[in-house]
Image: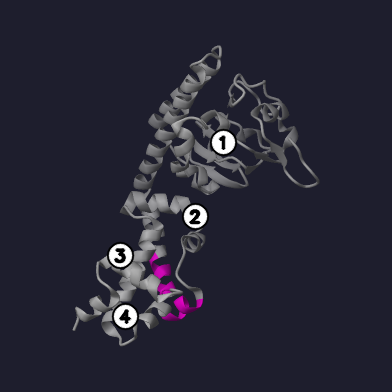
Amino acid sequence: MKATGQQPYVFNSISALMDRMGKPKPLHPLVALVNYENQKPNLADAGTTFMISFYKISFKKNWKGQVKYGQGYYDFEEGGMAFLAPNQLVTMSGDENNYEGYSFYFHPDLIRNYPLGRTISKYGFFSYAVSEALFISDQEKKIISGIFESIANELGSNIDHFSQDILVSQIEQLLNYSNRFYTRQFITRKAVYNDLTIKMDLYLEERLDPENSIVSGLPSVQEISDHLQVSPRYLTDMLKSLTGQSTQQIIHNRVIEKAKDVLSTSNLTVAEIAYQLGFEHPQSFHRLFKQKTSLSPLEFRQSFG
């Protein structure tokens, strides 16, 4: 742990963080589970910013309201879950009501030699923004509570040769259920996300206007995400759930549709069209167009002759 001036306190071990928070020493050096039903929060560090070098999962079963999490806020609708990847900033809340349910920490070293260590990046919710929390139903809460109870039981047992295998499998189960519940959320909140896709379509239509494309180049995933005020990973996961396509695929499809319109209604050269759409090199346009349509731009134009 270290801090300099206004820099955040940096915690590289879970034991050091638990000690700073006034919590009991963790039962496993690479894992800690804080159950706020049994442990009252220590508010001495309220307003202090920490950087933690491990994963954190928060699960609030019943509390309803706005919560400070990481560097931002989100609103719980009667409980939910939030996820932080290592090396993100966490500002300690001064509101005792925010400390409800479980906080679960696990160090990357715990999973490093397991398949999960290589595949954890597929759980995109660790890259979601604070406002993109997981809202879960009463039935889903029971499932998550059961997993945390199993983790607590395992942590309460004596460490043996099987401990790490079991903990990693429990974490993987927790992440797989979270993935399932996020997919359900994308479907049940479809009306909200349809508004986002409409907003994205309108933005892409404006961005692919020749004047805008020439000045700004091709639209990027980060640009679209910034415009919609969502994280890039959340946007892609949401779009894949609803449309089967990633943000990048949708951008490319819109570009190709625009290219088809111009190829079939103008006398511009392929190179001029490429630059007009925002490509730096006509070869890139040619390659993408053929990849998407199985025709070169000229072959597509000639099919209208």
Tell me the CA gap for discs 2 and 4: 31 Å
- Disc 2 or disc 4, which is closer to the eye? 4
Give coordinates of residue 36: x percent, y percent.
60, 26
Query: Which amino acid, mark 3?
Result: Gln
Residue at the top extreme?
158
Between the C-alphas of marks 3 and 2, the distance is 29 Å
Overall secondary structure of the magenta section:
helix
Badges 2 and 4: C-beta atoms under 8 Å apart?
Answer: no
Please state the total of marks drawn on the protein image.
4
Q: Is residue 71 above or below residue 99?
A: below
Q: Earlier in the sequence, mark 3 or mark 2?
A: 2
Disc 4 designates what residue?
Answer: 262
Mark 4–mark 3 distance (CA, rounded to whole Å): 18 Å
- Residue occupying the far front of the picture: 283
Q: Which residue is mark 1?
A: 55
Badge 2 or badge 1: first in the primary sequence? 1
Q: Nearer the viewer, residue 178 or 41?
A: 178
Tell me, yes or no, whether the two marked residues, 2 and 1, touch with CB atoms within 8 Å: no
Rounded to the nearest angstrom, the CA distance separating label 3 from label 1 is 39 Å
- Amino acid type shown at disc 2: Val
Residue range corresponding to the magenta coloring: 201-215
